Image (cartoon, grey):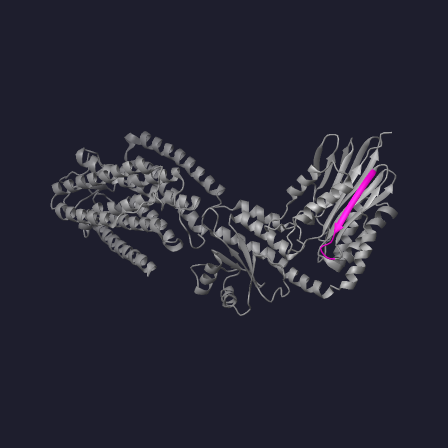
Amino acid sequence: MRRMRLILPVLFLILLAFDVFRGIYYYNASIRTKILSTPHGLSLYPVSPELEKKYFYFQEFPENPEMENRGISVYFFSPILGTIGVYFLTSMLLFLFARIRKIEKAFLIFTLFLILNLLFFFDLVTVSQFHVLFFITSLFINIPYLYLFRSLHGYSTHPRIIFLLVLIFAALSVYLIPESSGEEIRFFRVAGFVHIAFIIYSVVFYLQKRNTPGRNSIITSKTTRSILTLALIGTVAFPALSYLIATFFDIKISISHNVLFFLPSVFPMLFFFFALRQGIIYFEVPVPGVFLRFSYFTFFLFLFWFTVGFHLVQIPYNFQHMEFHFGIAVVFMLLLETIRGLIYSTLQKSNVLYRESLLKSFASIASSNNPRNVALFLRQLDQFVRKSLNISWMKVVVRDDVFPEWNIDYSNIIFLPQNNPLWNHRKFIKKAIPYPYFTGVTSAITRDFLQKNGAFLVIAYQDFPAMVLISEKVNQMPFNTEDINFLRQFLKQTEPYFKNYQFLITNIHLRRRERELELVSRIQKKILPEKYEDRFIHYSGIFAPSQLVTGDYLDLLKIKSKKYLLVLGDVSGHGLGSAYIMSILRTIIRGSVQINRDTLRKTCVYLNEFLGEQYQGSDFMTLFAMEVTLNRGETYIRFINAGQHAAGVYLKKSDKLIFLKENQRVLGVIATDYQEKEVSFREDIRIFLYSDGAFETVKDNGEMIGEQKLRKWIRDSVNLSPEDQKTHLYKKITARAHKDMEMDDISLMIADINLDNG
């Protein structure tokens, strides 16, 4: 019913426009006048640049000059057609995509009256079939203007005021309907004074209320309200000043004045711009990006034509004023191009027309390391999507048979039974649309589900039985099709992750044997060093597996006097499988460095080839290998970081904590030519290596500790011994861990390097 009340006026406008334009067509085919006039002969609208004599607005002339060619009148009606088009496009945008509240309703009503008035103006100066309605709408348009003006400031218009104005304008219409040219002039003067009265009221109201908007105001920015207020006042001021000036003074008729009919279109374009820029309008569905671009370029196309084009067209007919028209055209071209560039740049920065920031964010997750468990992966997805789309939250909806043994209390995942009708609805739509998205204006099933979960949008995976729920944007900005395309690409990228997790969880449950885990755990404690100390190095390390065994690998190897190898690695997955792979890789690394005397580069290349050939990318490893050499009062460090986190180096004398951030591809994915990096220091240092479990531990509030927090803890405790600092950091991490959350493997190693100054 709500939509029908809006559809009927649109149909009425279309039928009326068809009838008016049909009348204009027949009129234009038979009449060749250069100046269109009112039913009683007052000159009103020129349609030709060729005016030999001086003709004035609102004056009668005995003979209307005729044109040699037909059809030019429609050509010079383009400013009015442009204004009608801009208002119609913006109103249809609200009608199709927005929630109709007070301000949207006021804009649609104002648009209806304005388009009606312009259509009746067409009729007035041509066939005069509905010319009485032009006079009536010229007065009544002030009522929707008042309603829209007060709505912009958050104030309602009392129905009694509207009823009183209807009675006043109805009485004026009956009294002022002209029967002669003199009465027509009288009507235009009265209409002009009525408009001026409303303008004066608007200015006074704005000055009094500009700092105190109404409680229903949805425009929070004072600057935005001011701009829209001035633009709306200008829309009404144009006909008012035109009527008064042209009826009281002798104004020469010029085709250039026709472009003033396009000035009222500035308000809907500003309203449309701020609706997208500041979230004034609540859009219920994503706004098509093509629609945005079309509206933007159409508006400036009209603007260039009605300024530059109109003056260039007049040059062949007015050679005596050629320099004037050409100069005005150049000024408008430079000015409008500057304005167009600024607006387009603003739209780019606000991600309305071009989502460059989203594409960069998407590229970052596409190249990131694979997370270690589903819960952690979901948290990373949530953080990424919230940051990219500026939304409050994201939730994943999964069919309940996908992860049957899921026992983690994670609020951002929803399990739906297999027989829920939403799954069948998704399958039906998916046949026609890959990665379909639904909003609250689609089917009742989807609408009810969204309302129940307080979501705005749900988008489904293609093959994996899961969906992603999206909240509204934080700043109430609308979604557009670039957002949806980004989400589709995002789902396409993450779908294989979920499939791998499903397989991984099933595989882990099958292989999890308590006795084997305990055995491997005892072996790991023996082969993974916890402390070592000699004259030049003081090392302390800890590994805390999430289960009985770990896929983390930390090692200290003394290659020769004053030369050591520090290694921290992380095999994908958890449990027995990753622990088995870790033990193999440890053997390879020690044999390569100790026995074969291979370089770090050669060792990493071989590890990468081994993992790729044996596991075909299903298992991979991140690794930070560091070769430390002491020579003549200087410490040389050669290192390779294959997808691990940056190693920390604390300079004791300088009291500085730096990080070796150079990063290369993880081991076991694709063939890579790893390169060694080198740094050196002339003072005692302390080295820190840690796995992602040290800072991805989830706190009670659902947030992760974060790497920056861990680095701060490291910096604050550098005065402790390596053993004490290791214990201190581990207690910090575990004390903040959520009791019901599964922790990741935690590995941490600290090594003091003391220079040989002898």
Confirm whether residue 535 shows in the render. yes
Magenta residue check for 463: no
Q: Is residue 640 above or below residue 287?
A: above
- Residue 288 percent across, percent down from the top left: 44, 52
Q: Which of 433 and 72 is in front in this view?
A: 433
Q: Is residue 727 left or right of residue 386?
A: right
Q: Quadrant of residue 330?
A: top left
- Residue 719 percent across, percent down from the top left: 74, 35
Q: Which of 35 and 210 is in front in this view?
A: 210
Confirm whether residue 49 shows in the render. no
- Residue 401 percent across, percent down from the top left: 60, 67
- As drawn, the residue found furthest toward the bottom would be 419
Q: Which residue is drawn at 84% across and 39% down?
A: 563
Q: Residue at x 78, y 54 (%)?
A: 582
Q: In this view, does 463 lie to the left or right of 120?
A: right
Q: Nearer the viewer, residue 652 or 63?
A: 652
| Residues shaded magenta | 537-547
Number of marks in the rendered image:
0
Q: Residue at x 40, y 54 (%)?
A: 97
Q: In this view, does 68 lie above or below 287?
A: above
Q: Is residue 178 left or right of residue 3?
A: left
Q: Residue at x 76, y 37 (%)?
A: 686
Q: In which quarter of the image is the C terminus?
A: top right
Q: What secondary structure do most residues of the magenta stretch adopt? A: strand
- Residue 440 percent across, percent down from the top left: 44, 59
Magenta residue check for 541: yes
Q: Quadrant of the N terminus?
A: bottom left
